Image (cartoon, coloured by chain):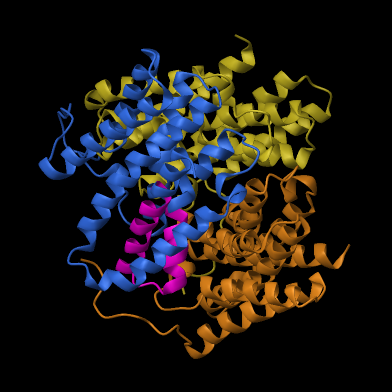
Chain colours: A orange, B yellow, C blue
Amino acid sequence: MTAFALLDHTSVFVFALTGALVASRAQLDIVGFLFLGTLTAVGGGTIRDLLLNRDAVFWIASPSYIAVASAASVLIYFTAPLLESRRAWIVWLDAIALSVAVAVGFGVAVNLGQGPFIVAVMAMITGTMGGLMRDVVANEVPLLLSQGEIYATACFAGALAGLAVLWLGAPLGLGMAVAAGLTFGLRAGSVAFGWRLPLYKPRPPRG
Amino acid sequence: MTAFALLDHTSVFVFALTGALVASRAQLDIVGFLFLGTLTAVGGGTIRDLLLNRDAVFWIASPSYIAVASAASVLIYFTAPLLESRRAWIVWLDAIALSVAVAVGFGVAVNLGQGPFIVAVMAMITGTMGGLMRDVVANEVPLLLSQGEIYATACFAGALAGLAVLWLGAPLGLGMAVAAGLTFGLRAGSVAFGWRLPLYKPRPPRG
Amino acid sequence: MTAFALLDHTSVFVFALTGALVASRAQLDIVGFLFLGTLTAVGGGTIRDLLLNRDAVFWIASPSYIAVASAASVLIYFTAPLLESRRAWIVWLDAIALSVAVAVGFGVAVNLGQGPFIVAVMAMITGTMGGLMRDVVANEVPLLLSQGEIYATACFAGALAGLAVLWLGAPLGLGMAVAAGLTFGLRAGSVAFGWRLPLYKPRPPRG
């Protein structure tokens, strides 16, 4: 397995953990865990592949992804009751999966010869869409839209940093590492220390 | 019309009935019935066809599907007021449409030469995604995620049984019949008799 | 830029305004504005292009669409606080974007040689799906499903009128203008004067 495929399976595995934890909070049965785990795990990459018109969606070309997502879902099915705070696990695992998936989406788009604009968009889609589907289907407030938290911003900054590194002549692997690292750093800072973007917020919501 | 196309139109028709009934509960106008009925009717098969990269999505290749879904939506528009319990009708019609759609998705994937893994996934997607879109768009709790009910599990068991029958050398039609039959039997048992999967449930939800 | 591309960019721009206004009501940060604005702006056309199996989704073929959507989102980020009633702005801008997008979807499908059935469906999908995604992701009640309002109906009527005009021998541009005009007229009448379809409504909702 190449380093690239290893990263890709990692993001699928960790996203599936988060989807299965959401299924646990909703008290679904084992197939509900598998459904929500797998949807979260492959959702972002699936949209990316459909948009980029690849010959085959990644998990159809290689079913090992579904196997990995299923294993993660079953693992959570048996271990979720042992966890102290499932919500905290979801947020942190999501931060890990997000970062790796941004790097994978970044790499896929670069390898397909896309321009920087589309590379950044594909990195964000791969990172965010699986978790967004998980939250919309489970009727939770999407992490992506958590008020005042850094989420999509982290992906965007990670992708830009990766592009900058490539533009300076670095190899793709380094660009991906920078993208993942900055995405995780910003997201983790938001979760752990409450980092925020300066809000331009002169009035209350709604209305 | 082949037996296959007949099944396919049946699932589209019955799913459209459920979508239009949900529109009736939400007091939409006639075009709202058509929209929600058609979305439910063709949603699962559309995702399947996009994922499998077929030359054309089934209802674009043959617009009779949209006509059938529209007819079902109009039928409900005029008859919904006569129904005693729309909720019960939705649940039972959904069970029928689900079972037929699982068999259709199963058959499409087998005919395209997909492996057993992807066949099972496509059967589940064809069965569940239309109803999931219906419920997410109408902001109802998805039937798919009804706590403790057998739903995705029924599709999964049906697809596995169909694969087993094919593996024993039976023709595709028999595999599809077995898939539909077991899916419907499990789902109906869940609705009528409260069948449940043994829940591994050692603690309350959330947290 | 052709008249067609100008229309297309207009619909993308105005839809992005509505998505960013929804982001403002939800108090997201600047990247949240960009995300929701862009999703709304290109959502409907993306589904249309995937369904029609075009060589490339329109905003991948030409990244100027993302730039336009981003500009609109940033514009709202700085001006939303100055608006008296964001809700009213959303409803009226959505009516404009809807009408233009119906005409664009109509034109794209006609140019691809689709039959009248699919032309009408693609006009509706292009018009409604971006706004539907906006509302589902932001967990607002979809404008599309607002009880008793004319929305999908307006798109449908607009598409039919456009088809009638083409059938009478008019050029595509006139058909598109008629489609946009009737869609906007009906939707605006519903918003401003409370126009309704005659409801066949003999009993209360739910049940």
Q: Is residue C17 magenta?
A: yes
Q: Is residue A69 magenta?
A: no
Residue B22 picture quarter: top left
* A199 relative to B25 in the view: left or right: right
| Magenta-highlighted residues | C11-40
State the predominant SS element of the stretch in magenta.
Answer: helix
Extreme residue in the left direction: C193
Residue A109 visible, this orientation: yes
Residue B166: percent from the left, percent from the top? Answer: 79, 27
* C170 relative to B169 in the view: left or right: left
The answer to which of B10 and C103 lies nearer the viewer is C103
Identify the image quadrant of the C terminus of chain C.
top left
* Residue occupying the point 57% across, 33% down: C52
Residue C150 visible, this orientation: no
Against C16, is A204 above or below?
Answer: below
Residue B153: percent from the left, percent from the top? Answer: 59, 44
